[in-house]
Image (tube, helix red, strand yellow):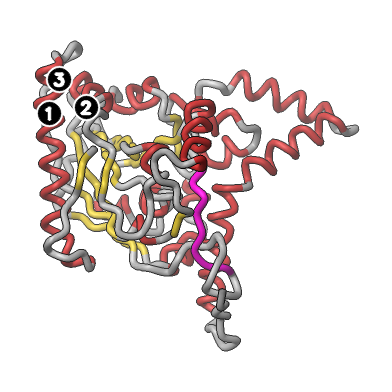
Amino acid sequence: MRIEFAPLNVPFRRRVQTLAVLQWVFSFIALAQCCLALFILLFLSDLWFLAALYAVWLYVDRDTPVRGGRRSSWVRGWRVWRHFQDYFPLTLVKTVDLDPKHNYLFGLHPHGVLVAGAFGNFCTKASEFEKLFPGLTPYLLMLPFWFRVPFYRDYIMCGGLVSSDKRSASFLLSQPGGGHAAVLAVGGAPESLEARPGALTLQLLSRKGFIKLAIKHGSPLVPVFSFGENELFNQMPNPQGSVLRGAQERLQKLMGVALPLFHARGVFQYSWGLLSLSLSLSSAVGRPILVSRDPCPTREEVDRVHTLYLNGLNQLFEENKEKYGIEKHRHLSFI
């Protein structure tokens, strides 16, 4: 394989942007393991009492990830996230105003490999979400598994990440006065196994739990489509029925997390590595789908609103796809 090395005269600002994305990738694939190792080493060292005190704190603080988390404006505003945004570049596209008197459930599509669009737009201040949608506070829902990892849980909560447990979303959507936006990557871990350049297939037909939740709380549903998300990484071939796909699906059922074997570019060369490709990434926020509050919605009502959601998402895609380089003849596919 021919390796294409990065030129020596790369501008300094570009090097900084690359380092910003490098630390982001590290935080997704290795930081949790490092935090767990640090916790174990503390327990085995003369500083074991610090680990014991933290273990007590974990118990006392166990419900925080399902009760809005503990966001930090300082962490969300780190300068490194501006460099992260400029690397792609990453943009948040507003199509309509959203009334901050409501609580919203944002459905994010596609999941992609590392949900770069969701992280940059909803876990940092880089895309200026608060200015585009004044009065709204976004909370990105993440698998509960990660909130059990010592130290790591506290770091991700600083960015506004909360557990994807139903109790967590219900807590946000039931807050009086509105102003909360729960952001859910609807396709979840299974969809990440299909994330590769050109993919437009979304796992949505059987996913109706988020629809039922929105109806229970009377929260408008807002489709969000990240154009360019699936183009950021390549993935090892894993067709249905393959040994690799079977192993990935067993891991997903066991731990709730998927393990896409992805690759793109490296730090000093463009041919292979775990860094994202530098491609434009635009997340378009669509029109809200209003629902009537019903604590016990019928299956027919859930199906009706689900159809409205599919139509709203498809409309958002069709109205914007050509702006972001997708051919007119290509359309979304729901499975």
Between the residue at mark 1 and the residue at mark 3, the CA separation in whole angstroms equals 12 Å
What number is the disc on residue 293?
A: 3
| Spot occupied by residue 209 in the image (x, y as percentages of width and height) | 27, 24
Specify whether 204 is left or right of 148: left
Callout 2 secondary element = helix
Residue positioned 60% across, 86% down in the render? 8
Residue farthest to the bottom?
Answer: 9
* Mark in the foreground, 2 or 3: 2
For marks 2 and 3, the one nearer the N-term is 2
The amino acid type of the residue labelled 2 equals Ile
Residue farthest to the right?
Answer: 46
For the N terminus, the quadrant is: bottom right
Instruction: Mark 2 and mark 3 in contact? Answer it, CB < 8 Å.
Output: no
Answer with the quarter of the image where residue 173 lies. top left
Q: What stretch is highlighted in magenta?
A: 259-266
| Spot occupied by residue 197 in the image (x, y as percentages of width and height) | 35, 60
Residue positioned 45% across, 38% down in the render? 161
Callout 1 secondary element = helix
What number is the disc on residue 91?
A: none
Can you identify the residue that label 2 sits on? 211
Can you identify the residue that label 1 sits on? 305
Q: How crowded is mark 3: few (under 14 residues within 10 Å), some or many (20 or more)?
A: some
| Spot occupied by residue 291 in the image (x, y as percentages of width and height) | 12, 27
